[in-house]
Image: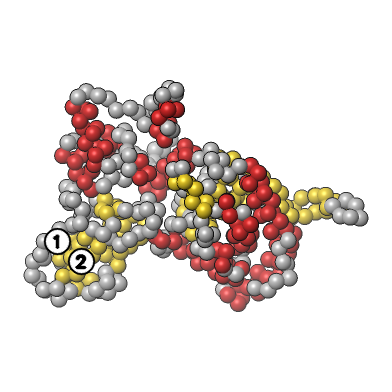
Amino acid sequence: MANYEVVVPKLGESVIEATITKWLKNEGEMVSLDDSLVEIATDKVDTEIPSLTSGKLIRKFFNEGDVVPVGAILALIDVAGNDQPAREMPSPVESKPESYKSETTPAGTRFYSPLVRSIASQENISFAELDSISGTGKDDRLTKQDLLNYMKDRQQGIKPMAQSPLSSVPAIAVKEATIVAPVTIQQVIPGEDRIVEMDRIRQLIAGHMVKSVQTSPHVTSFQEVDMARIVHWRDKNKDVFFKREKAKLTFTPIFIEAIAKAVRDFPLMNVSVDGSKVIIHKNVNIGMAVSLPNFNLIVPVIRNAHEKSLLGLVKSVNDLAERARISKLMPDEITGGTISLTNLGSFGTLMGTPIINQPQTAIVAVGAIKKRVVVIESPEGDTMAIRPVMMISVTYDHRVIDGALGGQFLAKLVHNLETFDSNQLI
């Protein structure tokens, strides 16, 4: 009998595990090539794992709700499709956890490895208690040793220190500070109010936002942009473009092109921070915030934006935005961003101060384009005119980007937009 092993594929940079959200095939069921077998979710994207062969699904090693590492064997498919019993296939993890059930539902966005969950289950440690333990792993992940140390301290009657935003501050600074445990505010819920649980994506977004604010000192600079050239060019080309490409011509690709050009002149805006190291990225990979139908948010990445033509950017933007809204993005398409763009103007907002998408250090926000009376300066004198004007801002991490660099980058960005070639063809 030939058995095919279905494994958790690599799911993008820094993603080491995934949660099984739904099995789409049952044991004993026949599957065909490219049939979707299981839905999985990470802290970055939801996706399906297809079958790379035809046969009978004879064994599932994990249940819905289990957290499994990348590379783990999820299931076995009998390629011959016979009824012989499946051979036991060990998982590459240290041990397959039992289904971890607790009276306390996990309220945060933290993920735990199968080994940690297994130890917690055996020791009757609830998710709420796990959430209170400080982690030393990447992104505050709770390691096996963290849990064992906690259990040892608990046996000796030592209470763990409450987690706080100061947890990432150097020890010398913590000694001078007063650490205050987070307080849960008890609310009285009137009978006519509704209580709804955050979905998984909203919990993840909340966690990322809080962590970003705790990590980076945010500074935001603003400028106005005269959008006359760009508005005129788009009005002239959008109908012809739609007839030819069957796609919309939006402002977003123009903003992305302007950012990529500005980064070329100010490469220190295209960096990330790793401890005390600053990583200066060669490629300009621009994250583009996309609002989903359920009011959540996802940020697909346009890779190597500095190498793409305006037409190439238009096609990339339309493709990623469309697939983002129908949950068809691949994990690699939402990782690796080096700077981000959010278009607040889509909803009529004039300006905003967005939160940096870690580990990036800058995010550009564009507001709604509104007609205003402005002063036009010229060698012949100043005049007043009605022009389409937009507010644009850049929020940056003041640990590595000072006001001078942020201001110069923003000024270059405005220059790129106001000098847009309105005679170019697309």
Of helix, strand and loop, which one carries label 2? strand
Name the residue: 63% across, 60% down.
261
Residue 236, compared with residue 127, is above or below; it is below
Q: Nearer the viewer, residue 33 or 338?
A: 338
Along the line of sight, the residue nearer the viewer: 181 or 371: 181
- The residue located at (23%, 48%) in the rendering is 114
**Coordinates of residue 321 in the picture (x, y in percent):** 50, 62
Residue that sits furthest to the right in the current view? 380
Asked where in the image residue 388 lies, by quadrant, the reply is: bottom right
- Please determine whether, in this image, residue 94 is positioned above or below residue 237: above
Residue type at mark 2: give it: Glu
Q: Quadrant of the C terminus?
A: bottom right
Residue 201 x, y percent position in the rendering: 40, 49
Distance from Cα at disc 1 to Cα at disc 2: 9 Å
Residue at (40, 46) in percent of width and height: 204
| N-term-proximal mark, 1 vs 2 | 2
Residue 48: give x, y in percent of width and height.
33, 62
Please indicate, yes or no, whether residue 381 appears anywhere in the rendered image: yes
Residue 5's disc is 2
How many neighbours does mark 1 have within 10 angstroms: few (below 14), some (14-19), or many (20 or more)? few
Say which residue label 1 marks. Answer: 89
Q: Are marks 1 and 2 in contact (CB under 8 Å)?
A: yes
Q: Quadrant of the N terminus?
A: bottom left
**Amino acid on which disc 1 is placed:** Met
Does the rendering let one see residue 186?
A: no
User: For residue 266, which quarter of the picture?
Assistant: bottom right
